Amino acid sequence: MKIKELGWNDFFNKSFSEIETKETFPARVAEVHKDHYVLFSDEGELRAEVSGKFRYNAITASDYPVVGDWVISRMKPEGGAAIIEGVLPRNSKFSRKVAGTKTDEQVLIANIDIVFLVTGLDNDYSLRRIERYLTIVWDSNVKPVIVLNKTDLCPELKERIAEVKAISSGVPIHALSALKPGGVKGFRKYIKKGCTTALLGSSGVGKSTIINSLLGEERQKVGPVKEGDDTGRHITSYRELIFLPGGGMIIDNPGMRELQMWTGEDSLDETFNDIKEFAYNCKFKDCKHMEEPGCAVKEALEKGELEEKRFQVYLKLKKELNYLATRKEIKSRNKRGIFKKQIAKWQKQVKTIKRNYK
């Protein structure tokens, strides 16, 4: 497999050419495990680990390679395995806030061209989750496609497609049944040679079934949904870059239990552009759309031109993003304060040394 087939392009070549040596070569991260990485390159498939220097220079977890990354590699002296010296700049990434109370970024996958947001048309179906996914994706520099799977279980298919279309801001929508013969035939048009795609969605929506249908074989483990609520069990346990017949790559992702935002408010405007359009006509530019006079958004709600549930989700996500922005600023100020204290400490040490040598 040549690196051009792996998605190598001028963007990555420019970055690599500035730092390459005779010993180094580019490779793409296909799998990430606790103690090693799996790389694809002109050298073949390689097991790899990061160098000691890389570990020393890494500041946060987001500095480490993720599936889809292009890395600077060299072969170990004994051969058969590689050392990762660095990560090339990413042209796109899909991130979320780490679980828990820490205000840190978790990069899940990188250098993706298209992301398929998969929703099941059974009890998993949720317009609100689709809105949340779209808000995150708009900030990732990736083209989204909404995939509605399990059409065979949905007698209200036309109504469901219309509902999703109303909240999707013009994003392409593809409805299919991955279990039916030829169910993913139209899906394949999005995946071209050298193109990297990814599937995102909760457990049980059929991500692994879609990949198996594209491959024409039962490669990915598939588990039954839970009885009674149609939610799935976590079968896919790690992210993996997979080659597809006819070219192109797809990344399978574990179902995500928690999807906390790591994005800016501009992404919210992309997802809720209908609310943004109404807001242009508000009397006050800084209208919060609550009790202000001349609020065009409240007027749209009263007239039934804007759904109340959608507006409440907008307010909830806006509040979440404002809180995230505040936490980021506090963390940034704390870092600046620590840095200033460190500089003052160093300056004091230098003065002491100079006095002692006089």
Image (spheres, rainbow, N blue to C red):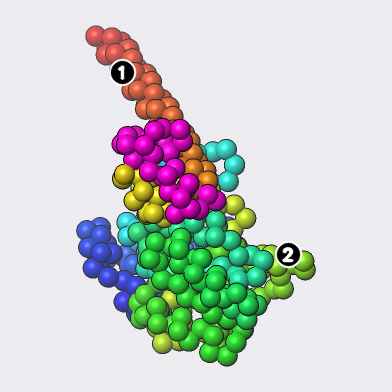
SS for tag 1?
helix
Q: Residue at the spot x=34%, y=67% of the render? A: 26
Label disc, if present, on residue 146 of the rendered structure: none
Q: Position of residue 271 (x, y in %)?
A: 41, 55
**What's under tag 2, amino acid-wise?**
Asp
The span shown in magenta is 282-310
Q: Residue at the spot x=48%, y=87% of the render? A: 185
* Residue 90 visible in rendering: yes
Q: Is residue 233 above or below residue 318?
A: below
Q: Is residue 143 above or below residue 96?
A: below
Q: Please tell me whether residue 299 belongs to the stretch shown in magenta.
A: yes
Q: Is residue 50 left or right of residue 16?
A: right
Quadrant containing the N terminus in the rendered view: bottom left
Q: Residue at the spot x=39%, y=23% of the render? A: 337
SS for tag 2?
loop
Q: Residue at the spot x=72%, y=73% of the render? A: 224
Q: Is residue 154 left or right of residue 13?
A: right
Residue assigned mark 2: 229
Q: Is residue 121 above or below residue 56?
A: below
Q: Position of residue 91 (x, y in %)?
A: 32, 60
Residue assigned mark 1: 347
